[in-house]
Image (cartoon, rainbow, N blue to C red):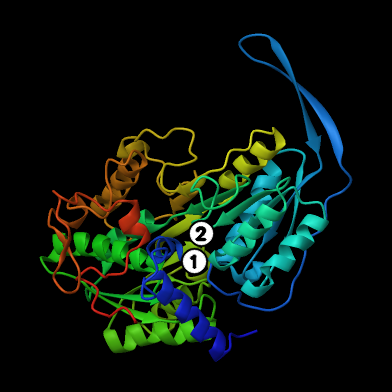
Amino acid sequence: MASTSKDAERKLLTRREFLGISGTAAAGIAVATAVAGGVIGYFAGQTSAPAAGPAKTFTKTITAAGPTKTITAARGLKAGYIYVGPVGDYGWTHAHDEGRKWADSHVPGWKSTYVESVPEAEASGAIESLISQGAELVITTSFGYMDATADAAAKHPDKYFVHISGYKSGAAGNATQNMSAAFAEFYQLYYLCGLAAGAVTKTGIMGYVAAYPTPEVIRHINAFALGANYSYRKRTGKDIKAYVVWLFSWFNPGKTRQAAMSLVEERNADVLAFTEDSPTTLEVAEEYTTKKGRKVWSFSHYSDMRKYGPHAHLTGQIVNWGPIYRDFYRMVETDSWETVDIWGRIGDFVPYRWRKPEDKSTCCKPEGVVYPAPVNSVVPSEWTTLIKQRYEDMKELIFEPFSLEGNLGEPIRDQDGKVRIDGKIVPRADHDMLWSMNWFVDYVKSPIPK
């Protein structure tokens, strides 16, 4: 069901509160987590996956360096997931559902159920429904579910809760101890995508199709622009220009198509990035490349989308929520729950976090929770090598996009010319800057809607 104008006004109001316009002290924290889960559900209605069978127990004996130990765990433990969109969106919700299935398959004894397309106002009822079905762990996957999740955690101290993209958790001290928060972050990957974009663009014009002007989307746009400008200026001595079209929707393929086409036709963009929940932008790039005789590049987002644009796909950002969910399964199963606030970036949840030389890099291979899609061979080798180097450096936080090094050794300025990162007082963007970002770097020529 499409959002009504009243719903849209409510979304904008919420975003303004996040950006601090309301003047509340909490807004500075809330803005940091207004992320791609969306504030309000895409569709009305609910659909559930098959329920788990009756509970069983199993005993496993393991031998380590030392005495033999016997571990008894419950087989048939159930997790319940709440999704803001349909599992078929091939974007945000699809990625969460793939992570759910991954976690189920990697922790024997667990099964899960889900409810999809849940509007924000119906989150409490969906949570109670999952608990009534026997869920020991409830995972809610949209920012707008945060308060309902916190309320349910307080109401059900014998259950466990994880909220995706929010700032409330027992670890933060603003929720009960049976509630954690988690997120998988893309800004580092967007910088790598920008490096690829700047290496192939002919026009020097970047187009960006964006859902909402939230801090998450803004830092993605900024990171992409920084990466694109780095490689383009190295090639040409000129700066890129990036233009943004706002959708004010997380999932609207029709509007996305119009936005992508306008960036090509009206701005002369030959690279299109996006933060929204469908492969439409990549499909538009493919159509220009194969049917209109105009080379346009685009990317994967959340999932590997190469099949939607085999001749236009440059690289992209991919997420696997599974390792995050697996760890929560294990904590519940072993009665070792500890409330946490996780922000998964490059290098997190990988078996070997140390950087590797470029010729042995694991860049573009599935690992951890976030990693790049394969890089098209059209990208010159010098830039492919740099992408691998940056990827490996980011594993150890040796390199960060929002730094002087990420901007050709120069301070990072906003659209008004104000220095935001000077390399001295502010050497690189920290957590608070990233999670409350409400300004564009000067390479982005479109304004942020008020």
Q: In which quarter of the image is residue 246?
A: bottom left
Q: Which mark is residue 206?
A: none
Q: Nearer the viewer, residue 67 or 424?
A: 424
* Amino acid, disc 1: Ala
Q: Is residue 119 visible?
A: no
Q: Quadrant of residue 205?
A: bottom left
Crowdedness near tag 1: few (<14), some (14–19) or many (≥20) residues, C-alpha within 10 Å: many
Residue 438: x, y in percent?
31, 69
Residue 383: x, y in percent?
26, 53
* Amino acid, disc 2: Ser
Please report contact status of discs 2 and 1: CB closer than 8 Å, yes or no.
yes
Is 386 placed left or right of 214 in the picture? Answer: left
- Marks 2 and 1 sit apart, C-alpha to C-alpha, by 8 Å
Is 5 placed left or right of 119 in the picture? Answer: left
**Image quarter (top left, top right, bottom left or bottom right) of the C terminus:** bottom left
The mark that comes first in sequence, 2 or 1, is 1
Task: Report helix, strand or loop for mark 2.
Answer: loop
**Image quarter (top left, top right, bottom left or bottom right) of the N terminus:** bottom right
Q: Can residue 184 be seen in this view?
A: yes
Q: Which residue is drawn at 50% across and 77% down?
A: 280
Task: Report helix, strand or loop for mark 1.
Answer: loop
Residue 399: x, y in percent?
27, 45
Q: Residue at x 48, y 38 (%)?
A: 350
Q: Which of 84 and 267 is in front in this view?
A: 84
Q: Name the residue under label 1.
A: 36
Crowdedness near tag 2: few (<14), some (14–19) or many (≥20) residues, C-alpha within 10 Å: many
Identify the residue at the far front of this view. Answer: 24
The total of numbered circles placed on residues is 2
Is 394 placed left or right of 249 in the picture? Answer: left
Residue 67: x, y in percent?
68, 9
Q: Name the residue under label 2.
A: 165
